[in-house]
Amino acid sequence: MSQGSQSPGVRTLQEAINLCYSDRVTPDITIDGIFGEKTETALRKVQAEAGAGVDGVYGPETRQRMLWPLRHENGSLANYCTSGV
């Protein structure tokens, strides 16, 4: 996924960035499923912190290296994060 993408996957990425990184690398971004300039900027900061290649594109390396919020059985997001999914 990259700037211009629109999907539920972008929304999931935005949720993960807000829940797992907003206190360290970026202020909260809007969760709207649209991969815009603010999402790209936030993702670049996440990539740098996670030790992934910094290109602003969400791909396999970024997915593996970044932190993700865990989900409860009912599908709601937990208040803690873990590496890789």
Image (cartoon, rainbow, N blue to C red):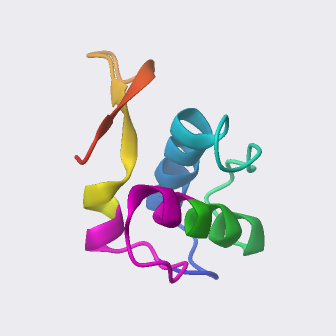
For the question of whether residue 12 can be seen, the reply is: yes
Residue 17 colored in magenta in the image: no
Q: Residue at x 33, y 28 (%)?
A: 70
Q: Which residues are magenta?
A: 46-62
Is 46 placed left or right of 71 in the picture? Answer: right
Q: Residue at x 58, y 51 (%)?
A: 14
Residue lying at 71% horizontally and 72% vertically, measured from the top left: 36
Q: Name the residue rendered at 37%, 69% in the picture.
A: 52
Residue 56 x, y percent position in the rendering:
55, 78
**In the picture shown, does residue 31 fall above or below 77?**
below
The image position of residue 79, as x and y in percent, is 48, 18
The front one of 24 and 60 is 24
Q: In the rendered view, does 71 fall on the left or right side of 84?
A: right
* Figure disc tally: 0
- Closer to us: 25 or 81: 25
State the image coordinates of residue 77 (x, y, percent, origin top left): 44, 24
